Image (cartoon, helix red, strand yellow):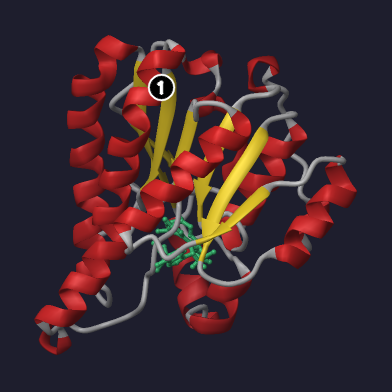
Amino acid sequence: MPVSDISPTATFHDLKEASVFITGGGSGIGAALTDGFLGQGAKVAFVGRSDANRFCDEMQEKHGQRPLFIQCDITDIPALKSAINSAATAHGPITTLVNNAANDLRHKASEVTEEFWDKAMAINLKAYFFACQAVEQGMRAAGGGSIINFSSISYMMGNAGYPVYTTANSGINGMTRSLAREFGDGAIRVNALAPGWVLTQKQKEMWATPEDLAAHLARQCLKEHLAPQDIVDGVLFLASKASRMMTGQALVIDGGVVGTG
Ligand SMILES: NC(=O)C1=CN([C@@H]2O[C@H](COP(=O)(O)OP(=O)(O)OC[C@H]3O[C@@H](n4cnc5c(N)ncnc54)[C@H](O)[C@@H]3O)[C@@H](O)[C@H]2O)C=CC1
Ligand SMILES: O=C(O)C(=O)C[C@H](O)C(=O)CO
């Protein structure tokens, strides 16, 4: 489905003018999130490795407001912190952080080198932590905020084929619970969101064989594959004061896989 067709169903009035920072907000689920937050009237900044100006043009045309794109590899922690500072300077202190960028490259345990491990963890876990650290003081000064850390049901399913990724996904949930405790006295909420299999263009091109899709659907209670926009309303809810007393949780949006297999 083209990005332009994405339309979240809920309106969260407190997200109007909110300063939102999204990692990997230019493609896949992240692009749907950028679109969704702009649709709420939020000010959105996002980072990604490759040029996203065409996507920003599309968003400006659709919403009358351009997201701020900052080119940045999130494994470069000083660059990530600098991007967060630039976004806060442009839009005001970040009150919603979405740690979305990740890499689910397939691999076998026997093939994992130390170098691969370090690189995978740098993208899928380390960057998440340092982005949380970088927004803490600004959120405290602003009177609070919401952090949403993308995890995945893949570790809950005990999936093979990407063990370093699933290790990081599990770590994200532990980190989320600890940071929820540590940041809670600043009214900063920290939650995880674990999607099921979401058929982005990349998933369709790289991993989704007809056999695997059928097997996955057989495990879902709801017999329809998820699209990126199915994740958006859940993120908006976690960002909004609609979830004001919810923190340290992992929200699963998967069509009903976990616990049914
Ligand atoms: N698509 C799916 O089926 C599922 C996705 N998820 C999670 O949802 C989130 C989004 O997933 P997708 O949209 O499928 O991912 P994707 O791979 O399609 O997009 C990830 C985005 O992050 C960016 N990115 C990756 N590495 C980066 C780096 N080093 N520096 C800066 N940007 C970088 C990419 O350019 C891209 O914009 C991830 O956290 C993923 O683990 C979880 C479960 C299932
Ligand atoms: O995190 C991921 O990426 C996934 O979980 C993708 C799908 O859920 C999957 O691989 C299903 O088998």
Residue 202: name its quadrant.
bottom right
In percent of width and height, residue 98 lies at 47, 41
> Which quarter of the rendered image does ligand 2 occupy?
bottom left
Q: Residue at x 55, y 40 (%)?
A: 87
Question: Where is mark 1, residue-wise?
Answer: 139
Residue at (35%, 12%) from the top-left corner? 187
Residue 36 occupies quadrant: top right
Residue 232 vertical position relative to residue 157 in the rendered view, above or below: above
Query: Element at badge 1?
Result: helix
Q: Residue 70 appears at what percent x and percent y? A: 57, 56
- Comparing 96 with 235, the one in front is 96
**Is 109 above or below relative to 251?**
below
Kindly tell me whether residue 253 is visible in this rendering.
Answer: no
Quarter of the rendering occupied by the N terminus: bottom right
Establish if 35 lies above or below 237.
Answer: below
The x, y position of residue 216, in whole percent, is 45, 66
